């Protein structure tokens, strides 16, 4: 049995997340997982992640991009961000808030992130979704996030489950070909 499952069974999920957050502050991992507090598969994801993963849980009232900017400033070694947020074919959902292309175009915090990381950044933003990158509206949204933040935003054009061992990131906002697989592998 791994440490995460032992802690989850013995301490309960809220204590586990607090413990892992303290542990992660010391580990300074290159991976940051951004997880919606209400994400349907939240518990499965938390149980499947490597123990040393830094986790940023986003609540309904939080500003997703503001929280991401704060995390990037506090942890400059982050090079891979993993988004576990509910998506549709053309939006990212956070609680009761939908963020579509026009919302992304108007959000000044995304530009602040881009100014912070610079145009030569090699930070990848992996969006774990089977719906967003497989259509023109979704890829336009991902490209706009990439354009404003200067991050390489990646998605999957064809998948059935983010837990599928064959899950592959085959869309890149920068048009780059990278060999990227799920954080679970």
Image (tube, rainbow, N blue to C red):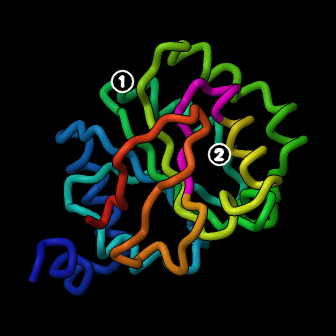
Asked if the magenta segment contains residue 150, the reply would be yes
Q: Position of residue 108 (x, y in %)?
A: 78, 25
Give the position of the N terminus as an image quadrant: bottom left
Query: In the figure, is residue 77 to the left or right of 45?
Result: left
Q: Residue sitting at 61 percent across and 13 percent down?
A: 115
Q: Would you identify the image quadrant in which residue 97 lies? A: bottom right
Residue linked to disc 2: 64
Residue linked to disc 1: 76
Give the position of the C terminus as an image quadrant: bottom left
Mark 1: few/some/many CA within 10 Å (<14, 14-19, 20+): few
Alpha carbon separation for disc pair 1 and 2: 18 Å
Q: Nearer the viewer, residue 31 or 56?
A: 31
Query: In the figure, is residue 145 to the left or right of 45?
Result: right
Q: Residue sitting at 60 percent across and 62 percent down?
A: 157
Q: Which mark is residue 9?
A: none
Which SS class for mark 1? Answer: loop
Asked if the magenta segment contains residue 38, the reply would be no
Q: Position of residue 128 (x, y in %)?
A: 52, 62
Which SS class for mark 2? Answer: helix
**Sequence order check, earlier mark of 1 and 2:** 2
- Highlighted range, magenta: 146-155
């Amino acid at each position: 049995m791994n440490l995460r499952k032992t802690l989850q069974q013995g301490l309960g999920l809220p204590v586990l997340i607090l413990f892992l957050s303290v542990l992660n502050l010391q580990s300074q991992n290159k991976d940051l997982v951004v997880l919606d507090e209400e994400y349907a598969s939240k518990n499965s994801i938390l149980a499947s992640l490597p123990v040393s993963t830094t986790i940023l849980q986003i609540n309904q009232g939080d500003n997703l991009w503001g929280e991401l900017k704060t995390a990037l400033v506090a942890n400059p070694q982050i090079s891979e961000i993993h988004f576990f947020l509910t998506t549709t074919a053309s939006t990212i959902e956070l609680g009761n808030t939908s963020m579509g292309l026009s919302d992304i175009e108007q959000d000044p915090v995304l530009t602040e992130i881009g100014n912070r990381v610079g145009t030569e950044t090699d930070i990848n933003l992996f969006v774990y979704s089977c719906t967003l990158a497989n259509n023109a509206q979704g890829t336009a949204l991902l490209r706009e996030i990439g354009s404003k933040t200067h991050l390489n935003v990646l998605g999957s054009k064809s998948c059935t489950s983010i837990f599928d061992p064959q899950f592959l990131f085959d869309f890149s906002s920068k048009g780059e070909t990278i060999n990227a697989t799920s954080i679970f592998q």
